Image (cartoon, rainbow, N blue to C red):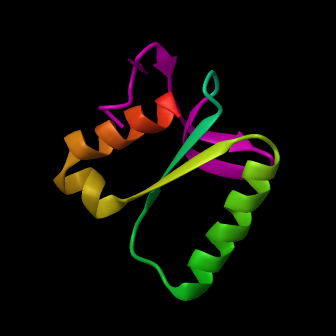
């Protein structure tokens, strides 16, 4: 959260944002980019996340999922992936 706080290349992220009936981890409204941080979970959760992502994408949002381990252990790499997503 500290790395996303403020802005990335002029894009402001908000945390725990309600969108289309879901609460997303981070959202940059100007880029319509959702960043979700995934912890360890089971198959049913992965299936639910895929349905949720599909619904959000169908409404014009872009969703980037990052493993929690990457965010904790390699935050610079996580931020680099977010910057790539912002360009896309």
Q: Residue at x 41, y 36 (%)?
A: 84
Within the magenta stretch, is there residue 18? yes
Q: Vertical placement of 78 versus 15: above or below?
A: below
Residue at (38% x, 26% y) in the render: 5
Q: Residue at x 79, y 57 (%)?
A: 55
Where residue 62 appears, as percent x and y from the top left, is 63, 43
For residue 33, above or below residue 74: above
Compared across the picture, whether 2 is left or right of 87 comes to left
Question: Mainly helix, strand or loop, the magenta region?
Answer: strand
Q: Quadrant of residue 70?
A: bottom left
Direction from residue 58 to residue 14 in the image, left or right: left
Along the line of sight, the residue nearer the viewer: 1 or 7: 7
10 relative to 53 in the view: left or right: left
Task: Tell me the quarter of the picture where residue 33 sits.
Answer: top right
Q: Is residue 21 visible?
A: no
Quarter of the image that includes the N terminus: top left
Q: Going by the image, does 38 lie left or right of 52?
A: left
Instruction: Identify whether 85 is placed above or below 6.
Output: below
Magenta extent: 1-28
Q: Nearer the viewer, residue 27 or 59?
A: 59
Question: Vertical placement of 20 versus 7: above or below?
Answer: below
**Number of dots carrying numbers:** 0
Residue 76 spot, x, y in % from top left: 21, 40
Q: Residue at x 80, y 47 (%)?
A: 20
Residue 48 location (% of width, % of height): 67, 74
């Amino acid at each position: 959260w500290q790395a996303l706080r403020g802005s990335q290349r002029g894009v402001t992220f908000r945390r725990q944002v309600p969108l289309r009936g879901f609460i997303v981890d981070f959202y940059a409204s100007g880029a319509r980019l959702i960043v979700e941080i995934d912890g360890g979970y089971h198959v049913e959760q992965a299936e639910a996340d895929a349905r949720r992502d599909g619904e959000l994408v169908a409404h014009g949002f872009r969703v980037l999922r990052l493993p929690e381990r990457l965010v904790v252990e390699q935050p610079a790499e996580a931020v680099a992936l977010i910057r790539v997503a912002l360009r896309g």
